[in-house]
Image (cartoon, grey):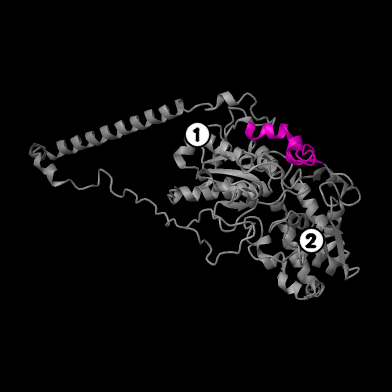
């Protein structure tokens, strides 16, 4: 049974059953027509045509074969005419008047003669050419996306941001060009550029098995989350894109179940239940119900939400970059037992982050603390990377929501994450992390820490052999946590984009095979 979106607020208590709000009965596959026209027994009325039965056997046989052949020819001709009619009447763009400035996201996007390879039979993706207002114009007006400062540098270089500086001597020199100061909310741009060059992209929508909607939902809502803006402002873009989609023939033929979208913020930014609350109500709008949504944090009780890794600063240029980096973090001399990078929440009573910082500072020499108050840990500093590279473990409490980008910065650096909430990772990134949480992480319940449990004592209880084994699992999964630099992807290693797209295509294929009908 596939649950629908719930009205779970940003910090809900998990419902007892896994899918409490599902009211849809398990869809049944239609029964196959086991009996063809040839196999069906004739009805009693057919026996009244007596002259037929007085013909010789061989004449009757030839007559029967002639009738069957004629039916097959008629059916074939009708199907051919139908397909030809559909293709010849598919509009090149139903909103041509809105496309005065079509998206110019990638200079290497395939031409109209592009043809995917033969092994793409069940994973051909058609990318909608949306009106520029839904993506390119947001980038063109990047200075307006944030009320405090321009986002233009952060969103440059196909979403990777500016080249990393200050890493000389921290990481191998030949890997410095593979590092950028990437913004945590740039995921939509990264996916769009990659999918335009995806090997199984098709330019013919009739041959597609999935449809990608390159709408920058996170950028569109981000500029309206603060100050004077009203709920109507925060909902406007999503209402516009759904209206546009509902005029597309392939959307209407499936109700959106074979469509997917990237939304570069956490799911709670799109789940407003009251007009005066935070965020937009995009996910709760009727047209969004059946779309597979790739986000950096999901609602664990919504089937159509899929959590994908936050973008980190490492964007390998080749397989060799990945292998060299894995070898580097594997052999790194780690000077401290654990570290914590984060800003305390002084306005929150009994703030858990403050508690972690105190424990870290009280074990001098065994823990490295990076106080991220202000902008000290924002994109453009090596402080956090150095802390993770030098520590065996890294503490990962929840962020402003249950997840945080620091999880991936930590693991890419080969440090072992220590979690205090199950929803920080275990109920989020199932496609990208090992199924056994103990194989790559440590879990200490937050209440134990609040009641006086020493984090230092828990981590010291792991032997060197155990730490080495867990770290090796972390290092093994690094490729699935990063987004590579080439627009075509790496040579043979699958990165986070590859895992996400293959997962979405597999899900859509399974839904089609099982005959799901969504309302």
| Relative to 86, residue 384 above or below | below
SS class of the residue under badge 1?
loop
The percent position of residue 68, horizontal first and vertical second, equals 25, 36
Identity of the residue drawn at 26% across and 43% down: 37
> Would you say residue 146 sits in the magenta stretch?
yes
Q: Assess disc 1: are there few (<14), some (14-19) or many (≥20) residues with their C-alpha within 10 Å of its C-alpha.
A: some
Q: Nearer the viewer, residue 219 or 381?
A: 219
Q: Assess disc 2: are there few (<14), some (14-19) or many (≥20) residues with their C-alpha within 10 Å of its C-alpha.
A: many
Using the rendered image of the protein, determine whether residue 222 is visible from the camera's viewpoint. Answer: yes
Q: Earlier in the sequence, mark 1 or mark 2?
A: 1
Q: Nearer the viewer, residue 381 or 276?
A: 276
- Judging by the rendered image, the residue that carries numbered circle 2 is 415
> Would you say residue 19 sits in the magenta stretch?
no
The percent position of residue 415, horizontal first and vertical second, equals 79, 61
SS class of the residue under badge 2?
loop
The percent position of residue 149, horizontal first and vertical second, equals 80, 40
Q: Is residue 165 left or right of residue 315?
A: right
- Judging by the rendered image, the residue that carries numbered circle 1 is 248
Q: Nearer the viewer, residue 237 or 110?
A: 237
Count of marks placed on residues: 2
The percent position of residue 176, horizontal first and vertical second, equals 85, 45
The answer to whether the residue labelled 1 contacts the one labelled 2, judged by CB atoms less than 8 Å apart, is no
User: How far, Cα to Cα, is label 1 from label 2?
Assistant: 47 Å
| Range drawn in magenta | 133-162
| Relative to 435, residue 123 above or below | above
Q: Nearer the viewer, residue 417 or 18?
A: 18
């Amino acid at each position: 049974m596939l649950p629908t979106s719930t009205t779970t607020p940003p910090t809900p208590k998990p419902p007892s059953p896994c899918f409490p709000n599902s009211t849809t009965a398990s869809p049944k596959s239609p029964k196959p027509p086991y009996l063809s026209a040839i196999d069906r027994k004739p009805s009693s009325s057919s026996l009244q045509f007596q002259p037929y039965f007085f013909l010789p056997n061989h004449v009757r046989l030839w007559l029967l074969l002639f009738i069957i052949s004629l039916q097959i020819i008629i059916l074939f001709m009708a199907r051919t005419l139908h397909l030809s009619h559909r293709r010849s009447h598919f509009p090149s763009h139903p909103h041509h008047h809105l496309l005065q400035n079509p998206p110019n996201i990638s200079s290497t996007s395939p031409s109209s003669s592009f043809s995917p390879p033969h092994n793409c039979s069940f994973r051909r993706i058609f990318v909608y050419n949306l009106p520029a207002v839904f993506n390119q114009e947001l980038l063109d007006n990047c200075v307006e996306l944030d009320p405090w400062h321009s986002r233009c540098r952060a969103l440059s270089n196909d979403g990777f941001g500016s080249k990393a500086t200050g890493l000389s001597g921290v990481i191998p020199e030949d890997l410095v060009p593979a590092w950028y100061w990437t913004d945590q909310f740039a995921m939509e741009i990264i996916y769009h550029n990659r999918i335009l060059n995806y090997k199984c992209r098709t330019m013919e929508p009739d041959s597609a098995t999935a449809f990608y909607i390159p709408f920058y939902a996170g950028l569109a809502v981000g500029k309206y989350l603060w100050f004077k803006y009203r709920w109507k402002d925060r909902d406007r873009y999503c209402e516009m894109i759904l209206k546009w989609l509902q005029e597309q023939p392939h959307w209407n033929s499936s109700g959106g179940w074979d469509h997917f979208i990237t939304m570069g913020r956490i799911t709670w930014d799109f789940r407003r239940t009251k007009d005066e609350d935070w965020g937009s109500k995009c996910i709760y709008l009727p047209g969004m119900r059946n779309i597979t949504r790739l986000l950096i944090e999901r609602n664990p009780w919504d089937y159509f939400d899929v959590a994908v890794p936050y973008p980190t600063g490492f964007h390998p240029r080749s397989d060799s970059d990945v292998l060299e980096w894995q070898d580097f973090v594997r052999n790194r001399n780690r000077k401290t037992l654990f570290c914590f990078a984060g800003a305390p929440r002084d306005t929150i009573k009994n703030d858990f982050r403050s508690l972690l910082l105190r424990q870290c500072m009280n074990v001098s020499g065994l823990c490295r603390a990076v106080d991220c108050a202000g902008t000290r840990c924002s994109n453009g500093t090596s402080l956090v990377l150095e802390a993770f590279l030098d520590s065996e473990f890294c503490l990962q409490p929840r962020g402003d929501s249950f997840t945080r980008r620091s999880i991936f910065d930590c693991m890419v650096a080969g440090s072992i994450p220590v979690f205090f909430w199950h929803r920080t990772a275990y109920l989020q990134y199932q496609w990208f992390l090992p199924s056994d949480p103990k194989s790559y992480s440590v879990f200490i319940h937050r209440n134990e820490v609040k009641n006086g449990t020493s984090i230092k004592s828990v981590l010291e209880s792991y032997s060197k052999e155990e730490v080495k084994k867990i770290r090796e699992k972390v290092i093994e999964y690094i490729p699935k946590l990063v987004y590579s630099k080439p627009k075509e992807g790496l040579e043979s290693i699958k990165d986070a984009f590859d895992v996400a797209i293959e997962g979405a295509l597999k899900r859509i294929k399974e839904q089609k095979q099982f005959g799901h009908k969504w309302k």
